[in-house]
Amino acid sequence: MRSIIEWIVVVAGAFGLALLIQTFLFQPFRIPSGSMIPTLEVRDRIVVNKMSYRMHPVHRGDVVVFTSPKCTAPGHPAWANCGIVGNYADLVKRVIALPGDRLAIQGNHVYVNGEVLSEPYLRPGTVTLGQPPYGCGFDGNLAHPYVIPPKMVFVMGDNRSDSLDGRCFGPIPESSLVGRAFVVIWPFSRIGWL
């Protein structure tokens, strides 16, 4: 009888510890779509550090998981609908612009603060300018710089022709960030740091 009680205590303790870790420190996520190809493939499993942005600010280029946006971006009429974004509780994208940055998309290049953004994570020939999928409302033109509001960031998928991202829903609140994705843990052939 005593060994049964010990096993119950060990299993309950392990379950409680795992729950605490997932709630406050690290959480696994499964990639449901191809919006981050080639960085993340469909069905990859990643781990998100939920403490990252309590210890340091968001950085341009971070791969982040965030709660699905409400589509209420200020100051730009193109961000009027989210397409099918509402079908997902959480999304994963890359941070392109930070609070106060001036963002523009011209001639198939992303400009941040007047400089072409270096994007080595994109496949050669990636088309950034143009209509994203699913009729999200973006007209393909962000020629005049848009200033990212305070406490917000602008995110885009690495697979620009198949990504519902900031071009559809505008900038997102930093408070909606679940955390920074930092490692692929599955499949074994793709294990590695992000």
Image (cartoon, rainbow, N blue to C red):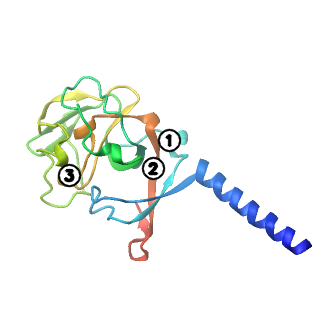
Can I make out residue 146 in this image?
Answer: yes
From the image, tell me which residue sits under label 2: 180
Answer with left or right where residue 115 lies relative to residue 171: left
Picture layout, residue 183 above or below residue 135? below
| Residue that lies at the very extreme toward the bottom in this rendered image | 189
Picture layout, residue 75 above or below residue 51? above
Disc 2: CA contacts within 10 A as few (<14), some (14-19) or many (>=20):
many
Please tell me which of labels 2 and 1 falls first in the chain.
1
> Which tag is nearer the camera, tag 2 or tag 3?
3
Q: Quarter holding the C terminus?
A: bottom left
Answer with left or right where residue 79 lies relative to residue 183: left
Answer with left or right where residue 50 lies relative to residue 154: right
Check residue 53 in the rendering and tell me which mark sits there, or answer none.
Answer: 1
What residue type is disc 1 on? Tyr
Disc 1: CA contacts within 10 A as few (<14), some (14-19) or many (>=20):
some
Disc 3: CA contacts within 10 A as few (<14), some (14-19) or many (>=20):
many
SS for tag 3? helix
Q: Residue at x 23, y 56 (%)?
A: 159
Q: Residue at x 44, y 38 (%)?
A: 176
Marks 2 and 3, Cα distance to the nearest angstrom? Answer: 20 Å
SS for tag 2? strand
Check residue 110 in the rendering and tell me which mark sits there, or answer none.
Answer: none
SS for tag 1? helix
Q: Nearer the viewer, residue 174 or 55?
A: 174
Instruction: Measuring from the top left, give residue 70's x and y in whole percent.
Output: 35, 33
Can I make out residue 61 in this image?
Answer: no
Instruction: Measuring from the top left, give residue 49's x and y in whole percent.
Output: 52, 52
Check residue 160 in the rendering and tell me which mark sits there, or answer none.
Answer: 3
Whether the residues at callouts 2 and 1 have beta carbons within 8 Å, the answer is yes
Answer with left or right where residue 178 lies relative to residue 32: right
What residue type is disc 3 on? Arg
Q: Residue at x 27, y 44 (%)?
A: 165
